[in-house]
Image: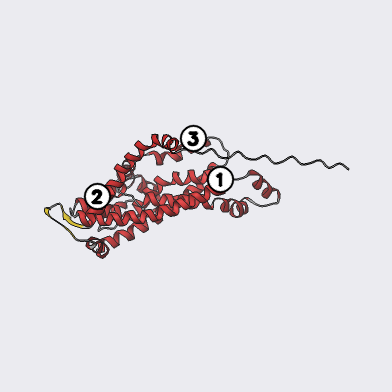
Amino acid sequence: MVVEALPAPRRRPAPKQVTRGERWKRRGPLLPALVVAIVLTQLPFLLTLYYSVHSQNLLRPGAARFVGLANFGKVFGDELFRNAVLNTVVLTASAVMLSMLLGLACAVLLDRKFLGRSVVRTLLITPFLVMPAAAALLWKTSIYNPVFGLLNWALAPFGFGGTDWVSEHPMIAIILVLTWQWTPFMMLIVLAGLQSQSPEVLEAAKVDGAGAWATFVRITLPHLRQFIELGILLGSIFIVQTFDAIFMITQGGPGQATTNLPYFIYQQAFRAFDVGEAAAAGVIVVVATIVIATFALRVISNLFREE
């Protein structure tokens, strides 16, 4: 019996050493963009930090003085700030959850083949392409108007016509606008997850006798978990910064009912002219946003690692 010798495994070539000059040649084209990003983001944030530890009011330009963390104490002790935090949480959570549910339903619909699917997909993506200020103005004048608004016209057969949505239900009015605007974003993320699902697994479940609902709950939904988490986290980061819809529709009212953190900062800076307190509130919002962004980046990295 002749035993043939196995061929020796090939050795991988040693990685080529990259010199420091070559590294800088590769990074050189990125330096202008990096400088612009630093000038437009980091320098204003450093200036915000400076103002946050100074008592400065635009109505008293010569009375600026260093106060340390006093502005942060004033912000945390301000009842309007606590109300803005509560409004921000309610607004963000409601808009994100509603847009995710609707986006999931639309994604499941678009994942199936039917006549005119490309046209329906284009129409569903359109709200995300409309400028937020223009969309808010459209909703205020054409949909929420108590006299000739489309919403009252649609609800009139059910006995809900003639409602002044902006005055009587301001938070619901803002949530509906944000849900309409961000549902396409959630839909695209979930649709990408649906299209990455293995068709062999779905076919095997169908052969085993699993129904459509059981297949969705036990196979599709667990597969979409990280895509849904990604959409919720990214949507939260963007929606927590909402300003245009509140400014255009409710102006933070009535009675501070829709004042969120960005609009609170605007009021302190450009209506009360208290730059120090507005800067302190801005620093708090930035820190909170960084915390949310950290979780979002972890979800993204886990998603790519699994793929």
At 39% from the left and 37% from the top, the residue drawn is 30
Q: Is residue 298 above or below residue 77?
A: above
Marks 2,1: beta carbons within 8 A: no
Q: Amino acid at mark 3?
A: Val
Residue under numbered circle 3: 119
Q: Earlier in the sequence, mark 3 or mark 1?
A: 3
Residue under numbered circle 1: 194
Label 1 environment density (alpha carbons within 10 Å; few <14, some 14–19, many ≥20): many
Q: Amino acid at mark 2?
A: Leu
At 33% from the left and 58% from the top, the residue drawn is 87
**Does residue 252 appear in the picture of this structure?**
no
At 58% from the left and 40% from the top, the residue drawn is 14
Residue under numbered circle 2: 47
In-image side of 293 versus 277 (left or right): right
Q: Amino acid at mark 1?
A: Leu
Horizontal and vertical percent position of residue 302:
52, 51
User: Marks 2 and 1, how far apart in space?
Assistant: 45 Å
Q: Give the SS element for disc 1.
A: helix
Q: Residue furthest bottom?
A: 77
Q: How many marks?
A: 3
